[in-house]
Amino acid sequence: MNVEIVNSKDEKAWKELFDSYYGALCNHCFRIVSEKMTVEDIVQDVFVKLWESNVSFANEQALSAYLYKAVTNNALKYLRDMNAEQEKLREWQETEQNMTEDDFSSVVREEVLRKLRELIDLLPEDRRKIILMGMEGMKGEEIAEKLGISINTVKQQKYRAYKFIKERLGDCWTVAAYFFL
């Protein structure tokens, strides 16, 4: 194989390179990863990255060493990433198993609160003020007096805000109403 032609990114030479090394690199990678589809992805990725790079080789031995080292490194990185994902999954499962009903309720409450705050931020400013004041525990009459508007305006703005929020929260509406409204 002429490495100079490979270095020049000649497509015919690259096809020959691929055909010549692909099987051997897959076998090498399979000893590390043991998942056929993943092995093929890793080896193909090495070829793609090499094609896209500006790396050139002095001889076929240097090219061969590079390919095997790149496949080995990518396979080990894959295993490291999978191990990290498995560890995170295991930790989450342990946390979930040890989670009390109060802990779960707290998580749900925080998620509903986050979504509720997001929706309140979408309300027109006057309506948003009224809802936030109500969430702080103020009664309709107090809100009306503080803002210098009628109690009917407060009720109408609350109604429109609740309707807007309810439409967007869907099934979570009951939980949100229970906790916050």
Image (spheres, rainbow, N blue to C red):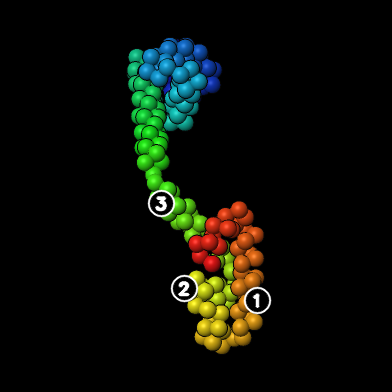
Please state the horizontal and vertical placement of residue 82, each as a whole percent of the image: 40, 29
The answer to whether residue 109 shows anywhere in this view is yes
Disc on the earlier residue, 1 or 2: 2
- Residue matched to label 2: 136
Residue that appears at 38% across and 14% down: 31
**60 shown above or below 155:** above
Please state the horizontal and vertical placement of residue 179, each as a whole percent of the image: 50, 62
Q: At numbered mark 1, what does the secondary structure look like: helix, strand or loop?
A: helix
Foreground: disc 2 or disc 3 = 3
Report the Cα–Cα distance between label 2 and label 3: 23 Å
Left or right position of 33 against 117: left
Disc on the earlier residue, 1 or 3: 3
Please state the horizontal and vertical placement of residue 106, each as a whole percent of the image: 42, 54
Q: At numbered mark 2, what does the secondary structure look like: helix, strand or loop?
A: loop
Tell me where residue 34 sits by quadrant: top left
Q: Residues within 10 Å of mark 2 (few under 14, many from 20)?
A: few
- Residue matched to label 1: 156
Question: Disc 2 vs disc 3: Cβ atoms closer than 8 Å?
Answer: no
Left or right position of 99 against 123: left
Looking at the picture, which amino acid does disc 1 mark? Answer: Gln
The answer to whether residue 147 shows anywhere in this view is no
